[in-house]
Image (tube, coloured by chain):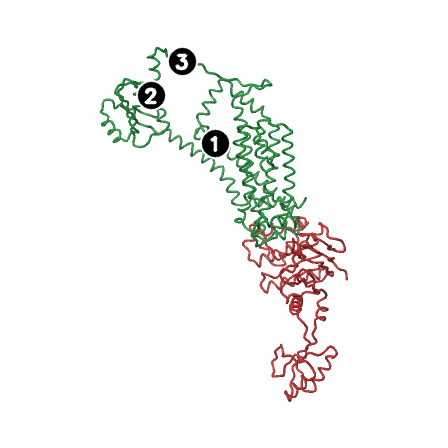
Amino acid sequence: MNDLLVAEGVSKSFGNFTALNDFSLQIPQQSIFGLLGPNGAGKTTFIRIINQITMPDKGQVLLDGTPLQPEDIQYIGYLPEERGLYKSMKVGEQVLYLAQLKGLSKQEAKKRLQYWFDRLEIGDWWNKKIQELSKGMAQKIQFIVTVLHQPKLLIFDEPFSGFDPVNANLIKDEILQLREEGATILFSTHRMESVEELCDSLALIHKSNKVLDGKVADIKQQFKTNEYQISIQTKDDAAFLQAINEKFTVLPADFHSINQDVRLNVKISETHQPNELLSFLMNYGVVNHFVEVIPSVNDIFIKTVNDHA
Amino acid sequence: MRNLKLIIQREYLARVRNKTFVIMTFLSPIIMVGMIALIAYLSSINNDEKRIVGLHDEANLFEEEFVDTKDITYINYSTYSLEQAIDSVDAKEYYGLLYIPVEEDKTVLSNKIEFFAKDAPSNSFISGVEQKIATKLTNSNLVENGVDLTKLADAKTKVNLQIETFEGEQTSKMANYIKMFFGGAAGYLLMMFIIIYGNMVMRSVIEEKTNRIIEIIISSVKPMQLMLGKILGTSFAGITQFLIWVILGGILLFGLSAVFGLDVQPPEVSQQAVTQAANGEIQKIITDIVNLPLGKLILCFLFYFIGGYFLYSAIYAAIGAAVDNETDTQQFMFPIIIPLMLGIYVGFFSVIENPHGIVSTIFSFIPLTSPVVMLMRIPFGVPWWEILLSMLVLIGTIFLVTLLAAKIYRIGILMYGKKPTYKELYKWLKY
């Protein structure tokens, strides 16, 4: 698969502060890429470098295989975390202006706007001023501004902040739809559940360095602990507990169930197969629950950041 | 280029459609003309006030001097005693009582004349009375010493110096005032323009910051482009407003003087004009105006106006980018206001006194003051090489300052929550 965006050894410092240190990244075409990291890690600096708002001290960023050019801004749509609109300007006029700055002609922008306004059912907002709209409504307008010029690369920085769950879902579906239509999406957020839901790949920045990078599935594979959640109905609980404690590492259960089973988290060593645990359990009774513990992105995030602290 | 046009257009429309802007555009000339009318009206009321003055002149020495005028009526109290006269004048609430005692010796008399009044009389009234008495006493002294007053009057000669340049061009004595007027008006106009519209640029930069729209915009355009667009858009709005002010103010003033028959010019000036007209002075004034280096003046006015405005509004834009809200701008206003004030003061004191003196010359080269000071100097005739040098320095400074301002702007617009210091700004320059 081709990479739409490639960063090669990008470094940037402000005075004595290093914001990004030798940062490299590949974002595959038509994927959703999560850019994660604690506050102040350098995510925004990297995003601003892609948008050519700041210039890197070292390294380069390639879009579609060629180094970024000033004209490339029309292929990029950016929804910053700190975002707003002119308060006293009318919605329609404002979006037209911003779309024209991205290189669309007025007629074309108008046509596409009509489409988006209908799609998000906000047609009657055209002549309203931003100050008359709620925060969530203004966010919708900003979303439209970001996608209107049909960019190849979309950058969303905390896109769901300020949305109620219904509208957040609406925007999430739009983002997925945009990927289907061919866009590549760089997605920066602190909401791990939306990373879990949306991202194909991710990278984790910590203290200006990339500490983790890859497909979400691969990363999870890498972080798996060979831990299984089990629940079992036995005739003699005490005997079972003694036996399992001798054979495997047993941890307290971190899940709930609806019946009165014995619930445990069991860790098997690298050399064991899950089947060995399963057949062991089957000797003692009815297995109601057997699930591999897959590390959540949240766990991975916290573990990685703590490891690098 | 297309984006710059779009930004200018938006900025212009945003300024022009702003309610405060519209109201100020149409209200200011009305207020100004209203003020002029009010002042003219008030001073005419003041002049219309009639004063009644009691006159106690037992010797009837000044009968001829103190006759009724349209402002002052004299009532003769000579037959009363002084106490009675004072009581009566006080009771009738007259302006006051002038008491001239009987005294042979004029030197003694001149120090014994008194004016009684409830409140302190006005200075012009006192000097009027003093002058009348002095003239009368001087004349009678002259007559006593055998001087024929008519001969004395005939002997008086008035000198009217005819001023001519080395090139043989006759000029009026008004020439310097005319030059001062043109230079001063140009310099003052520029200062006002810079302060009003520079502030507007600054506010519009702060607005984009507090709106948080800035990052959306600079992901589409270069910060430098945005800054230029804002400065240009705002200045076009400023020129629009200025033009409306001039036109509207002119119409109103014209209408006012036509309808109310108010003499807008102070009466002394028109009187002077009349006497000068007799001497063909008007003709000379017109020649003077025509002889002003008008082409040079207009050319330089345009250059310094644009250059000066641009220089300052770049600084204004940088300040706007550095702060989060308008209250934080105070500390950075210093480097703007001080040179402007200095320019105006140097202009009004030094240039008018000695247009080519060392102070004026130096300040017309220093780029932050040169637009104002040079504009004031030019009507007095400044050699081309000086103007060119000053212009070159200004252009160089504009480039440098715009570059620095753009750097601060670029960093500043993305900085939130910090109240920057000069040290901080200096650090930004190195990023």
**Label 2 or label 3, whichever comes before in sequence order:** 2
The chain displayed red equals A
Q: Nearer the viewer, mark 1 or mark 3?
A: 3
Horizontal side of residue A181 vs B332, given as left or right: right
Horizontal side of residue A291 vs B120, given as left or right: right
Identity of the amino acid at label 1? Gly
On whether disc 2 and disc 3 are found on a single subunit, the reply is: yes
Q: Nearer the viewer, mark 1 or mark 2?
A: 2
Numbered disc 2: secondary structure:
helix
- CB contact under 8 Å: marks 1 and 2: no
Task: Please tell me in which quadrant of the rendered image residue B81 appears.
Answer: top left
Write the residue at 60% across / 80% down. A258
Q: Nearer the viewer, residue A197 or A16?
A: A16
Q: Quadrant of the N terminus of chain A?
A: bottom right
On whether disc 1 and disc 2 are found on a single subunit, the reply is: yes
Write the residue at 53% across / 43% down. B21
Write the residue at 60% across / 30% down. B298
Res B133 label: 2
**Label 1 or label 3, whichever comes before in sequence order:** 3
Q: Chain of mark 3?
A: B
Residue A215 percent coordinates (x, y): 72, 66
Res B153 label: 3
Residue B264 percent coordinates (x, y): 46, 29
Cα–Cα span, label 1 and label 3: 45 Å
Horizontal side of residue B98 vs A84, given as left or right: left
Q: Chain of mark 1?
A: B
Res B255 label: 1
Identity of the amino acid at label 2? Ile
The chain displayed green equals B
Q: Nearer the viewer, residue B318 or A254?
A: B318
